[in-house]
Each structure stands twice: as C-alpha cells, then as structure tokens.
Amino acid sequence: MKIEDVVCTFCGCLCDDLVVEVDGRRVVSVENGCTLANEKFMGDHRLQSPIRRNGKGWEHISYDDAIRETAEILCDADRPILYGWSGTHGEAQSIGIHLAELLGALVDNTSTVCHGPSILAIQEVGHPGCTLGQVKNRADVVVYWGTNPIDAHPRHMSRYTTFADGFFLKEAFRDRRLIVVDVRKTESANIADEFITIEPGGDYAVLSALRAIVRGKREIIPPSVSGVSREQLFRVADLLLSAKFGAIFFGLGLTMSPGKYKNVRNAIELTEELSRHTKYTISPMRGHWNVYGSNEVFTWITGYPYAVDFARGIAFYNPGETTSVDVLRRKECDACLVVGSDPGAHFPKACAEHLARIPTIQIDPHTNATTHLSRIQIPVAVTGIDAEGTAYRMDGVPIRTRMLFKGEYPSDTEILERLYTLVKEAKGP
Amino acid sequence: MNFLLNTGRTIRQGSYVERKNSDAYKGEATSLYMHPVDMMILEIEEGSHVRVESNQGDVVMKVHPALWISQREVFVCLGPYANYLVAPETHCSGMPDFKSTMVTITPTTDLLVTVAELMERCGGVRYED
Amino acid sequence: MSELLVRNAYVIDPLSGIKGDVMDIAIRDGKIVEEVGRNAEVIDADHCLTLPGGVDSHSHVCGTKVNFGRYMSPEDMRAGRTARKGVMHVTSGYSVPTTFGNSYRYSIMGYTTILEGAMAPLEARHTHEEFTATPHQDMLANTLFDGNWSIMEAVREKDVKRAAAVVAWTLSAVKGFAIKLTNPGGTEAWGWGEDVHSILDQVPHFGVTPAEIIETMIRANELLNLPHSVHIHCNALGVPGNYRTTLDTLDLVPDLNDKRQTLYLTHLQFHSYGGSTWKDISSKSEDIARAVNNKPQVAIDMGQIMFGRTTTMTADGPMEFKLYMLHHNKWSNHDVELETGSGIIPVYYSRKSLVNCVMWAIGLELALLTKDPWQCMLSTDNPNGAPFVKYPEIIALLMSRRFRENELALLDPRTAHYVPLPAIDRELDWYDIAVMTRAGQAKALGITGVGKGHLAPGAEADIAIYPLKPDSLDPSTEYQQVMAGFGKTRYTIKRGRVVARDGEVVVEGANSTIWTKAITPPEFDLSVDPEFVKKFEQYYTVRMSNYPVQDVYLPRGVCIATEASL
Ligand code: SF4
Ligand SMILES: [Zn+2]
C-alpha cells in the first residue's frame, strides 16, 4: 500500500510530502525523502521488549514490570529529572510535563544542548521570524550562518530556499542570492554566492561589524574582523541591504560557540537593524523533528520553553541552574527518565557518568548510547511510523504525523499515561 | 600537538543515529578530520589512529584528511566520542563548549572502542542484542 | 441524571428580559430546565447577583502568537505563579498566563465562554491544542483572512461567491468560528515591510484595497449565513488621527442581518485617536460613538487599556513594529505564508504618559457614550490593553463616576484637555454590565441558539453567582465592593457543574470548541478547484491533505452548520 503526504519525523524541516509504501508492518520504499528519511523509514532495528539491568548483565521483562518499577524509582527519588521529549509527539510531551509536575521533578528537553541559547537571546530581544513559505515565496537573499543544511537539514534548500520556486521568485536558483557563514568550508558553502570564513569564536565580532555597516558607520571597520576582510564585509552588507525580503537562518555554530546566546542576540539585532531598511526575518534551524513542539508544549503548560524545575511546587526556570547538563554536572538528581533522546551520546562525559550512577530509565524504540547507562529501557512505537501525534516544524507550523501501520509496540503516550496513573495513585490526592 | 576540537552534524552521523551500536555509526563518530599539513607534522596517514585527550579524558579516533578545515583545528561529528572530551561547564548558560574544546592529539596503535565500551567506561553496563 | 437547583438568585438575564428578579434556577444534565425533582442538589444564592456565565467576545488566550508571548517573556511568567493545588495545575504568567492560568482565572471571575481573537488558519492546530488545555471555558476561534491570497484574488475579480467559498472551505478545514480581518491588506503588505494607511490604499501586487476586502467579506459572510458577523480590527491601529479611517470603515457597513450586527469592530479604543502626532493625540470617542449610535448594524468592543505592565500581541505585524520603534523593548514578529502575520511586544501603560492617559479615557468614553449597551462589549483586547483580570476594575469605573474622578486625579493633569471623560456623568447599572459582559457578546457572536449568554430553559447551565447584593449595594459609592465581587464568584457553574467556588477551581474541566461549517453547493467545493489546489501544490509549504485540523483535536466539538445561500 502506498501512502501519500507522509510526514518525515527526522529533522526540523518536517517535510510532509513523502510517499511511503508499506507491506503489513514493514516499510518497503520511500519516495521524496532525503537520505536521513530513507534511513529512518527503512530502518528496522528496534529493541524487542523491555529490558532491565541485572547486575552485570541484562534481562527481558514485561511491560507491566518495567512500568511499575519505573514508577517506583520515580516516586522514591528526591530529585528526579525527566529529560528528552524532542523525539516524541506533543501529546506524550504533555503527559510528561504533568508527570513532572506531580513528582515535583525537573523537566527539560533537548533544546538545552541545541537552541537553548537562542531561546535565551529571544527572551532578551524577541524574534522577528516567519513561516518557511514566506521565505520560499519572497526571499531574494538567504543567509545560512553557522549551519550546514546539506548535512543537517538536507531538504531545507530544495523545499524552502535556494532551489524552491515561489510565487514572487519563479526561478529561485537564479533569482536568489545565497550567503553562507561558517568556520569551515561545508558542503553548503560550496554553492554560496558569498562564503564568509570566520575564525572560531569570531561570530560576535563579525555580526557587530555588519550591524555597524548597516548603521552607516563604515569608517570604523578595521581592515579585518575575525579573519573576514573589510572589503568582503562591505560587499556582504550591500548584498544584505539590496534584498526585498531577506531571510537569515542560523544554527549551532552560533549557539555552541564562545559567546553562545550573545551571538544569537547579535544576529537578531542585525535582523532588526536590517528591518529598518527592508524586510528581514531570522529563524533558528531546529534539529529534531519535534524539538520546537517540546518548547511549545512546555510553554503553554509551564510558561517556559525548557529547563523547568517543579521542586518548589511552582514552575521555576533558571537556565544555567535548572538545565540538564548543569544539574547532572552538580550530581544533583537521583533518578532520570529519558524519553525520545540520547543524552548518553549528546551530553559531556561527566553527565553520562552521573546518568550511570543513578537509576536511569529510557523510553525509546532503539538501543543507543543511553541504553548502556540505564537500568531499564522500554521500547515504544516510532512516531510517524507506527504511532501518530502532533509535531511542530522549526517555524512553528503544527503538523499531525501519520501512523503508517498499527504495530506491536505501545506509543509513548500509552506508556506515559500508565506511568502517570501509577504515580498519581502512589502520591495520593 | 594541540588542536581546537569542533563538532557538528554530518549526514552519515544522522543516517546511523538510530543504530548507535553499529559499526557504521562507530566509524563515523570516531572519524576525526584534520588538515593534511597537520597530519604531516604528526607523521600520520589517512586511517591512522590517534589518541585525543582533553582535560576530561582521552579517546581513540581515526584520522581523515580534510581541506575544508583550518590548521590546528579538528572536526568530529557530534556524538559520544567527541563528548567524551567535552567539559560539562556551561558558564551558567546551560550549554557546554561543544565547539571549542582544546585537545592534544598523539599517534597511537590502540584500537577504536565501541559505543558500549565507551559507556562502560562511564560506569554503564553494556547491552548487546 | 444530575439535578441542581439554585435558589434565591437575584437574576439578571437580559436575553430573557429579566432585569433583576429573585428566583430559582433549575438545572438538569447541564441544561436549564423548568423544574427539577425534590432530590436535586441545592445551592442557596442568598439574593446574590446571578448572571449567565461570562462570554468574552475578543481575547487572546491560545495559539501560536499567544504562546510566543509566553516563550519570550520569562519575566511575565515569574509575575504570576501558583503551585499545584487540589485539581489545579501549576500556573505561570501575569499578562500572558499559561493555558491553565487563563482558564482558572477566567473561571473564578465567572467566565465560561471565550472567543480567541485571532487564529492563523495554517497554525490552527496549535490553537486547538491549547483550547483543549483551557478546560473551563467553551472556546471559539476567529479565523484570519486579512491577507489571504485566495480571498484577495476573489476580491480583485469582484467575485463575492468565490470569497464565500474560500471562507467556507477554510473555516470548516481549520474548525474556525468566524471571519477575522486584522488590518486587512496590511498584513500582506508587511510581507514586504510595508503597510496600508487608509482603507483606500492599494495592497502591493494584489491590486485591491482594504475597503474592497471589507465590503466583499461582509457580503460573503452573509451569503454563508454564519452566526457571527465579520469581526474587524481596523486599519491604522494606534496611529494618531486614525479615527478617520475608523469612520470610513463604519461608513462601509450595510445593514444585512436582522438578528445581529453586520460588522463587529474590535478594540475600538485603539482606533479613536485624533491629532496628528503623539504630541497632540486626542480623544475622538464622541465622533466614533455618534457614528455607532447612528448605525444599529454595528457592534464594538472597548479595548480598554489599564495602567501597568502587559504584553501586546496581534496579527497586525506592521503595527507592532511601529510600536517597537517607540518602546525599544523587545520585538517578535511572525508572518504566516499566504494568510496573515503577527507581532508581539511588551508594554507598560503609565499614568505619567499623557498618551496612555488619553487612551485610558477613550475606552471608558466609548462605553459611556454608546447609548445601547448591546452595541458595546466590555473588553481589554486581552492582553493588549490589559490582562482580563482587570475587568472588575473596569466594571467599577463604568458604574461609578466618583471612582473615575478619583482615578482622573492621579493622571497627567493635561489629560482633561484632550478628552471628554470628566464631563460624562453616566453611570452604568447592573443590567448594562450584564449585557456588556455576556448577553451582548452571545448575541453579537450568534451563539444564543447553542444556549450561550442566557438562562432560559434549554440554555446551557453556565451561571455565575457573584457575592454582590444589588438590592443593598450602591455601585456609585461602594465601587470597591463591586470590584472585589466581580473578581471572585461565589459559584461558577459550567454545564450544570460547580467548577469554581470562592476563588478556587474545584473540578477538572472538559470544555467544548464551537465551530462553523457552511454547507455550499458542489460547484463551490474548493477542494477540487484547480486554482485553489494550486496554492497548496506550489506556494504553501504544507500539503493540502495535511492542512485541515483533524477531529481528534476537538474532543468535544460543537459544529454550527449553516446552509449557504450561494
Ligand atoms: S529534510 Fe529532514 S524532514 Fe525532510 S526528509 Fe530529510 S530528514 Fe526528513
Ligand atoms: Zn485582539
């Protein structure tokens, strides 16, 4: 059976035009998707059943036992943390947050190690953005700053920018100018009209230089700024200002480099500066397919996009203190539930060590690095393949992912609902 | 020899992300990209193993030449191997210095470890299907 | 079967013509009935003011832009925090509370129905997700058509029926309630960083004017026989001298419907400015109110501002940028492809700002100078003018001249020179307030037929009992009690269940979402129209099949179906 308009649950592009052929409980072929989508849909290496660590080895256990034991661990903990969420649908995220509320737990999502700094910058200066179709239909200048879409968001250029024809740009590739800024010459840089190589850690200075030029202060620019020549800066500023509609996209090159949220703040302020002359928007390249959804759901329930601590009864937010890496670094939490992410692979070693020290439970369809650090892993259905629910694209557009077939695994929602019920019973009214 | 370690996403890392315990993932996540001039100075060749050490620990990786990277900088895709070297300090921002870890690189004949072995070194217990 | 009897209630039920009678209200299975059996549970209202549940006909509480207001404002979240307690979830936020925060606070004030003022169709799913997390009110969504390409093309072709067909398809796809025009044409212009400045400006590339959009949509709305009228946020919001644009807009309105208004103009305070700069801004409330009084075919809401901190958020992207250029605090903007836009900035309305003082006076003046309370709803365009928790204070200001004088004394002394407020003696009475906070809204929205805004047998048993005794209370002097009383019901009853008591929510809620579906003849079915389908194939970034909001997002949807006259 061929299913059309399937939503890809891999990256933040959340492409919704895949055609997937399904035979029973097996995906046979994928059309329109990129390499990453093909791997995701064609992959079949799920964990078969719940497992539990047993001394130096592992044993298979039933879902009932796994869920009951998880509930006990969470109820016993003084300072549990519920982490992940970007790899599951919104309905599950919502239950997870209410579970944290019930437990007085910390709850955090993967933005903490990707666009958390962007959120901090937005909380300082705001965010002039737009949906991706606005860029596709109008943008004549596109900037990728500290992001490499060809590797990380393979269809971003073909669906939304460089190669995507739009209403006001009938021949996008010819009519749009592309600027790429990075510390290394990425694949994306190879097709740029202007490629700016910045010395590592130099983004803030280059952004400041561009802001100064846009403000008309060319005379204060030194011959070279973080490895970028004055001539190139002038050329790029002129190109930026020539736009009828300019769209800036930025990635981890800004959020993870020295300066972090201040880099992003400067990029937003450059956008704001440009908006006084012509139309400009800026957007973070969100990584996981539903990381933006986790920010949205966190926000409408708790008021904050990530790093929320319920220990005081109220929702308390203080990134740098209530962020996962900091809490683990301080060896503060004494139990961890991981849903839809792999902190074993994506947190610094010291954090992985603490996850191994405390009872860590993982809810995930696949084994990964965190598996080896855990006490229990509960396999679930993959959202977008054998489970469905809401996802938010990197630009905030909500899309319902599809279930392609009914498999044998329970969804995240089902597991979390059962956990919630058990914890609620244990905690009393 | 000292280098600045940069990390980021790659399409292969993304492709194998749901098979983190596979050889393919191990191959990509232990691939270290270095400028050929630096390789000459270190007297190593494509495919040589190196020990990469930071103030957090050390891990073995496999070298690949790359012209898209500057001298004295190396690139490894984000994942458990790179993160074995990254400090948990966030300077009160929540975000570690994933793109600016100072590392020392020396040639070695030691073998690459699997993700499971690496996690065991962190205190975990390896799970094998 | 569950039965409830509210005894000794001092009832004002304007839609039923009850203007203050002590009586009993019988409830069975969530509806008002003539009588109940002897075993019914009894609540003694003890002669307290008892009204139909409050209806807010224009508020921003759910959806993309509201959530972004929270997302970007941890300082606002910290300004209103409550812990989990009983059935109540944690809440955060003062001017943009979390969904549960909104729901509890509205419920405690006796509100049981809210219309979200602006939903972008492309992002409707988000609004509905937040509706589900706003459990104590029935929700409706104004759906934005101000910059809709298919609409503007139909307007250019002078094809009202096609415009109606676009509305019918869209409302039913996104489970919206009514047509909202926010700065019509201006949001599309903002896609190029531009704006329209009067109703006769051309929208770039589309060759239509705001006036043409408004006139076409008014007629399309009536062709579809929708319960509500077109709901407009006029062009030139917040600009000195904009009252002319507002008068021009009022002049466009024909009288096409005998059950309700033909155009609903929202937050009119922001559209009633005289002068030509921020230095000489003055109140034009008298001109506007005169026009409203002369046109029974329009209804308005106040858009009152109150002093203090709040967050402004609207689909009017260009206006927010202008506001940002004044305040330089922080600015968010979010344009939505082929449809609309939005902007958000935090603001502080100060008694020390003459401009803010004039704005404050205008809102009150509009309510006091509009003769017929059915034409003017009480609103703050929550949270743009003030968070809705300020409604009780506004009620008190409208009911007490003395309170207004005391407040005026605290303002910039030049205020009196620019506004007529000090000369207005009128004090609204309990009946006026009952109209302006529920009955008028229900009528204007066209939802009396689904049992909203009144207490006649058959109506939804949504009831608010306030600790106020109209027989013995003089609002003119005892305005503090009025304010306190409207802030906290003794009982809020939603669909026959007590949901809030004395400031606390006591049950988990389960609301409904009310949406409209106009049934059109097959030749107007746009799902097979090549031009319309092409929009999705070529210009939208979401496939047509993934666009409509699935039924799972409305666990208790109430569909008002109409037969279109096409
Ligand atoms: S670009 Fe991203 S969402 Fe689109 S198909 Fe590739 S992995 Fe999936
Ligand atoms: Zn509004």
Image (tube, coloured by chain):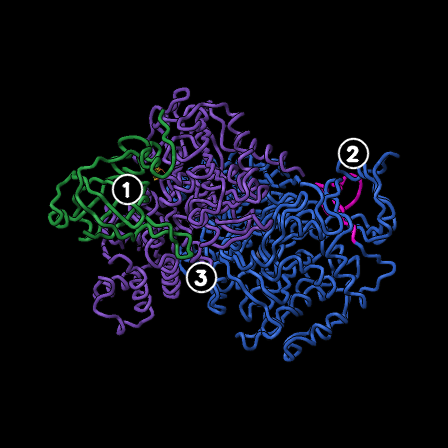
Chain colours: A purple, B green, C blue
> Could you say where residue A106 lies in the image, as x and y percent from the top left?
52, 46
Q: Quadrant of residue C6?
A: top right
Dividing the image into four quarters, tell me where ligand 2 lies. Answer: bottom right
The one nearer the camera, B12 or A267, is: B12
For the N terminus of chain A, give its image quadrant: top left
C168 lies above or below C233: above
The amino acid type of the residue labelled 2 equals Ser
Q: Quadrant of residue A141?
A: bottom left
C501 lies above or below A399: below
Q: Secondary structure at mark 1?
A: loop
Q: Secondary structure at mark 3?
A: helix
Q: Is residue C217 left or right of residue A54?
A: right
For the C terminus of chain A, give its image quadrant: top right
The one nearer the camera, C102 or C178, is: C102
Q: Residue at x 63, y 67 (%)?
A: C307
Nearer the camera: disc 1 or disc 2 = 1
Tell which residue pokes out farthest to the top in this image. A24
Q: Quadrant of residue A97?
A: top right
What residue is shown with label 1?
A: B10
- Is C465 magenta? The answer is yes
What residue is shown with label 2?
A: C2
Give the chain of mark 2.
C
The amino acid type of the residue labelled 3 equals Val
The amino acid type of the residue labelled 1 equals Thr
Nearer the camera: disc 1 or disc 3 = 1
Label 3, label 2: how far apart the Cα atoms are: 53 Å
Q: Residues within 10 Å of mark 3 (few under 14, many from 20)?
A: many
The one nearer the camera, A226 or B103, is: B103
Which segment is the magenta one?
C449-466
What residue is shown with label 3?
A: A125
